[in-house]
Amino acid sequence: MVVRYWWHFKYRFFLFFNRRRNQQHLIEDDGEQIDDDENGIPRYDAYVPYHIEDEDWVDGELLANIEEGEEPFRLCFKTRDIPAGRLIFNELSLHIQRSRKILAVLSPRFVEDNWCYFELNMAHHRVLEEGRNVMILIILEEIPNNKMTLLLRQLYCRVQCLKWPGDGHGQYLFWRRLREELKRPVPLDRRFNI
């Protein structure tokens, strides 16, 4: 059982011993101390886990339309916003907690990568722990049935899924819908209670 659910144990262990750290002031890169939960407002609008091979789409499309649009949202990326030299496991968990929503960019490469799948598991753990539906899945490419895991099947049924369209009008509607989902408040969702 420990071998099969090792990441559950590791994540629970981390939460147990680092809960105090998540509530304290954190030092920014410029040296200022900022309380992330000041006035109850998260630092980021969304944390974005994605596979490195999908970085062209993330940089070219997602950043241009969401972070640099008319109403910019503040997105958190592992490669850009997590400082180098710190424990990646701690920082990932902290940044997932600091974000209002999780915006996962799914592709077959994402599912095959253990690290990406681990990030998805951590985000799913937050959904279960808070009892709030804070996750949005962007399906960049269809995932074959033989690569669909139980976790992905559960997420497809429970969270908002947006499929990336191929045509221009569909992409306009996609960005409009994604902006609406990011603006929407995070309600308590009883379906996720254990």
Image: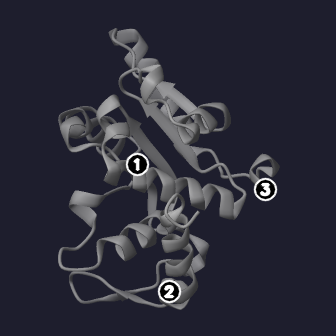
For marks 2 and 1, the one nearer the N-term is: 2
Which part of the image, by quadrant, shows the N terminus? bottom right
Residue 133 or residue 173, whichever sits in front:
133
Q: Which residue is mark 2?
A: 18
Residue 91 visible:
yes
User: Which kind of residue does numbered mark 1 sit on?
Assistant: Tyr
User: Residue 66, located in which quarter of the rendered image?
Assistant: top left
Question: Residue at 32% across / 35% down in the picture?
Answer: 65
For marks 3 and 2, the one nearer the N-term is: 2
Instruction: Give the side of residue 99 with respect to residue 85, left or right.
Output: right
Residue 193 or residue 77, whichever sits in front:
193
Helix, strand or loop status at disc 2: helix
User: Residue 105, located in which quarter of the rendered image?
Assistant: top left
The image's mark for residue 193 is 3
Task: Where is residue 126? Give x, y as percent.
Answer: 59, 61
Task: Where is residue 50? Give x, y as percent.
Answer: 32, 44
* The furthest residue to the right: 190
Helix, strand or loop status at disc 3: loop
User: Which kind of residue does numbered mark 2 sit on?
Assistant: Asn
Instruction: Give the side of residue 62 with respect to residue 96, left or right.
Output: left
Q: Which residue is mark 1?
A: 117
Label 3 – label 2 distance at C-alpha:
23 Å
Task: Where is residue 138? Give x, y as percent.
Answer: 44, 33
Vertical order, 176 against 9 (above or below): above
Query: Pointers 3 and 2 in contact (CB under 8 A)?
Result: no
Neighbourhood count class around disc 3 (C-alpha, 10 Å): few under 14, some 14–19, many 20 upward: few
The image's mark for residue 67 is none
Helix, strand or loop status at disc 1: helix
Which part of the image, by quadrant, shows the C terminus? bottom right
Q: How many marks?
A: 3
